[in-house]
Image (cartoon, rainbow, N blue to C red):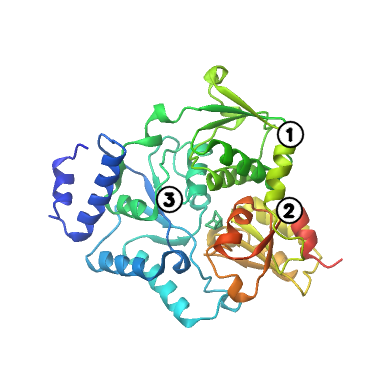
Amino acid sequence: MYLTREEEKLYEGEEGWSYQVAMRILVKLGDLFEADRLISIDSAHISGVSYKTIGDAAIEFLEALSEAGAKTKVTSTANPAGIDYNHLDEMVKQPKIHERQSRIIKLYRNMGIKPILTCTPYYIRKPKEGTHLAWAESSTVIYANSILHSWTNREGGPSALAAALIGKTPNYGVHKSENREADVVIKVEADIKNEAEFGALGIHVGRILNDEIPSFEDLRHPRETQLKHLGASMASTGMISIFYPCTTCPKSSDRLERISVDTDDLKNAFESLSTSSEPPDMIYIGCPHCSFEEMKRIALRLRGRKIRNSVKLWICTSRHIRRRAENYVKMIESAGGKVLSDTCAIVTWLKEIGINVLMTNSAKTAYYAPTMNRVETVFASLDQCIEAACKE
Ligand code: F3S
C-alpha cells in the first residue's frame, strides 16, 4: 500500500508509539485486502466498549495507548458500555465491574472519543452522503451504507480506533464504488408488517447470503425503523455491510440472480428466534438503540397502563434521544418501565441480575442473547412485547 511521506513517518514511530501502532494496524489491514492507499475519513465509531466483551487485556492496551498520548484526529463516537451509571439499581452489583467499566470509558474519553455510548450515533450526527467513515458495530455500519449512503467497511474495534487516531482508513471493500453493487435480488413474497418481521427477514437473508449484497424487491414503503431492524439482523447472521431497499435498487438488477423469500421462510426464521414459551422476566426494546419515533410509539402504547410486578421493561436509547424524548420517557417511567442509556441487553450482565427469559422485538438480540447472555428468548412484535409487559 502506498504511504505518503507523512504517513511513513507515523509508521516509523516518529510521532510516537501510539500512532505507530495505529498505522501498523491500518497498513496490515490494507495489505491484507490489497488497498492501494489510505483515504481520509469523516468520523470513526468504535466498538469494544463493554467490559463484558473486551475484558482486562484490552484495558491494558487502551491504557498503554492513552499513556503514550494517543488522540483522535476525527469525530469519534463509541458503542454502548456494560453499565448505565444512572440506573445502578438495575445493573449487576459487583464493584470490580463498575470500576473497570468506568476506567474503559475514561480511557476512550482521554483519547478524544466522545462518551456518547450508543450504536445509533447517526441520530445525533448524520454523516453526509458519500463521505468515507471507519465505523465498527455491524448494525451501525449497514445503516450508514444503506440508509445514509455513507461509505464504511465493517471495522473491528481495533481498526476503528486506529482509523480514529490517524484520521484515515485503507481504501478497499465498500470504499470503492465497484464493490457496492448488488449481487442478488431478494424478492419478498411475504407480507411484512412490523419491525420484528423485518428482523426475521434479515435473519433469513443473512443466513443464505453471507457476504453478498442484496437488493430487495417488493418491500412496500418500509419505514426507517423497519430498515434499521432489517439491516441489524442481516448483519448478525451474515457478513453483509450494505443492502438496497427497493426504492434505491440499481437498474442493472435484471441480470442478477433472484431469490424468493416466502411466508414459510419468514415463519421459520421468526420461530427460530424464540427458545422458550415461558413467561419472560424481562421485556427488552432498544436493539439497535431506539429512535425518537420508537420512543413515541412505546410511550403512547403505555399511556395510562402499568407494568406487571413480575416483569422488568427495559427500553434502551442514546442519552441524546432520551433528552429529546423527555416527555415520552416520563410516560414510560410512570407506567413502571426503565429507560436506559449507554448500555444494551446484549453487552450488560442479564443472568447475574436474575434474568432467565428475555422477550424482545429485536431479531438481533433474540439471535445473540442465548449465547452472549445465556438466557432463553421469546421473540415478538413491539405491540406484543408491550401487551406482555402490562397488567390487564
Ligand atoms: Fe446496539 Fe447492543 Fe443491539 S450495541 S445493535 S443495542 S446488541
User: Which quadrant does ligand 1 occupy?
Assistant: bottom right
Mark 3 vs 1, N-terminal side? 3
Dot 2: element: loop
How many angstroms separate mark 3 from mark 2 (CA)? 28 Å
Residue 186 position, x and y percent, is 61, 30
How many angstroms separate mark 3 from mark 1 (CA)? 32 Å
Residue 41 position, x and y percent, is 34, 43
Decide which of 269, 246 is in the foreground and name it: 269
Q: Identify the image quadrant of residue 92.
A: bottom right
How many angstroms separate mark 1 from mark 2 (CA)? 17 Å
Q: Is residue 177 left or right of residue 167?
A: right
Q: Is residue 363 left or right of residue 72?
A: right
The mark closer to the camera, 3 or 1, is 1
Residue, disc 2: 380
The quadrant the C terminus occupies is: bottom right
The amino acid on which the numbered mark 2 sits, given as a three-letter code, is Ala
The amino acid on which the numbered mark 3 sits, given as a three-letter code, is Ala
Q: Residue at x 73, y 51 (%)?
A: 381
Mark 1–mark 2 contact, CB under 8 Å? Answer: no
Q: Residue at x 44, y 43 (%)?
A: 127
Asked if one can make out residue 107 in the rendered structure from this viewpoint, the answer is no
Asked if disc 2 is less than 8 Å from ligand 1, the answer is no
Residue 354 position, x and y percent, is 64, 75
Q: Identify the image quadrant of residue 390.
A: bottom right
Mark 1 vs 2, N-terminal side? 1
Q: Which mark is residue 190?
A: 1
